[in-house]
Each structure stands twice: as structure tokens, then as C-alpha cells.
Amino acid sequence: MNAENGTVTADRQPDDALRPSATGLTGKRVVVTRAPHQAAELAALLREAGALPILYPCLAIEPPEDLRPLDVALHRAAAGDFDDLVLTSANTVHILAQRLQALGISLPAFPVAAVGPRTAAAAETLLGLEVEVVAGEHVAEVLATNVTTGTGQRILLPQSAIARPVLADLLRATGAEVTVVAAYRTVLGQGGEAVPAMLASGQIEVLTFTSSSTAVNFLKRLENEGGHRRDLTGLCLAAIGPITADKMAKLGMPADVVPVSYTLSGLVAALEIHFAS
């Protein structure tokens, strides 16, 4: 375990076979702010650790309002106009699969790079593409260093409408020609449990955030639904990685827990260590 400035991190994830039946998370009520189609995996991991997941979707994933740039890029890709495809999230893959089906086209077999194994698995399952490069860490900077580029190499980079420009900038710095297109947008989520009321009555111990958008939208939902920031005092706030943690700090919600492994299992492992200690 590492501890820096009060933030607990997990150096390694505990082997499931060695995990005790009662863990540091046993009985803890943990809010899951992920989109509905993504929440189940984290909720299952929390239940395995003895926690009680509370679903409170703070974002939803939708195609861009103007589909034309994405459709043009997909037609170009189908025609062989790109040398590589770089994927930064499973959300991108899901939207690409939807649009390809709607357009009645498919992507050719060409080199694909993905950030993380789940994005790679989604690309292989939904797009039928073999992923050649999988970044070991779930951040754009690491993905950029794993992609082999050269002058004039044509790269298609579909991503969130609010994605950071760092990945495209790093790839262009190597001489590559990068076409960036918005594949999806995040909107405010709805539904789930009555978390503002539960916070006010002290029924929540942990809030988890798996992206900057979940943190931003959590505060929007909380305010829209009559909640108050003061009800977050004393709670454990957990971020899946440093980018999310940085955004949380800027929002006035500094993270107490950030895993070394920027994955859902890493997040749960770090929470277990935090409460066990």
C-alpha cells in the first residue's frame, strides 16, 4: 500500500482466491455513478467484496447530434482511406457498431490500437477487428507511446465529443495524419436510487467516479435533485485514475482513493485496502 497526501492506492490487486469472506468493504454502501449499460460490472465487483452498490447513473452515452462527420469518416474507413484505427473507450466501439450497421458497411481488417482490454474485447466482438496494440494503462498518453506511427500515416481517432486533445497531438507530433471525429457525447443520466435523500440521512459511505464526466454530472444531478455538497463531508470519494482525480479536485471533491491500476477491479481493491486500514 502507498499513502501520499492522504490518498490510498493499491500496489497490486488481491488474488480473488485469497480474498477473505469479510473484507474492508463489507456492508459499505457504495454509489456507482456509471452509465446504465456500464454499471453492472462495477456493481458485481462491489458485491463480491461485500459492499452494497447503490446505482445512480450520472451520465448516458448518445451518438453526436450531427452524425454526418462520423458517417463520412466511417465510409472513408470502409473504403480503405485510413491505415490505423485508435480506440479510446468501449463507448466509442458501441457507437461505431451502431452506425456501421445503420449505414450497411463494415470496416476492413487494418491495424487497431485500444486503451485497455475491455475496449479491445469490444472491438473484436462488435466490430470483428483484431486488436494489435492494447495499452497497459488506461490513459491516452500511454496509448500514444504504444502506437507505431510514421510520417504520413493515416490514423482514424473516433472519441468522445469532449475528449482531451492530448492523444491526437501526440500522434501528430510523430508525423501522422490524424482524423479526429466525435463518436459519442455524454449527457446527464437519470434514474437509479434516491441518492440525494440517502446522503442527507447518512446512508452512504462511498462515492465512486470512473471518469471526469461522472464527477461533473454527479454534482449537477445532486443540485438538480435538491441535494447539497455539505452532505458529502466525511464520505470516501474514489477515482478510477489520476485524470478523474484531478477533475474531482478542481470540483472541490478531492479523491481519498485512487488505484495504481486504473481498472474497476483496481478501484475495488484500493477501496478494500482503504477501509481495512
Image: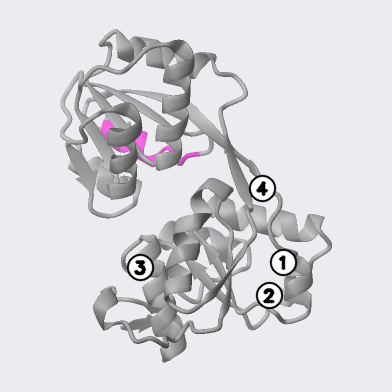
**In terms of secondary structure, what is the magenta stretch mainly?**
helix
Mark in front: 3 vs 2: 3
| 38 is higher (above) or lower (below) than 273 | above
Q: Residue at x 34, y 50 (%)?
A: 139
The residue wearing badge 4 is 189
- Quarter of the image with the C terminus is bottom left
Question: What numbered label is drawn on residue 266?
Answer: 3
- Residue 118 tag number: none
Chain part drawn in magenta: 163-171
Is residue 165 inside the magenta stretch? Answer: yes
Q: Is residue 232 visible?
A: yes
- Residue bearing the label numbered 2: 232
According to the image, label 1 marks what residue? 195
Q: Amino acid at mark 3?
A: Gly
Q: From this viewpoint, which residue is outermost toward the top? A: 79
Helix, strand or loop status at disc 2: helix
Earlier residue among tags 3 and 2 = 2
Name the side, left or right, on which 246 lies relative to 90: right
Label 4: which secondary element = loop
Asked whether 252 or 194 is in front, the reply is: 194
Residue depicted at x 70% and y 79%: 203
User: Which tag, 2 or 1, sits closer to the chain's start?
Assistant: 1
For residue 50, above or below residue 164: below
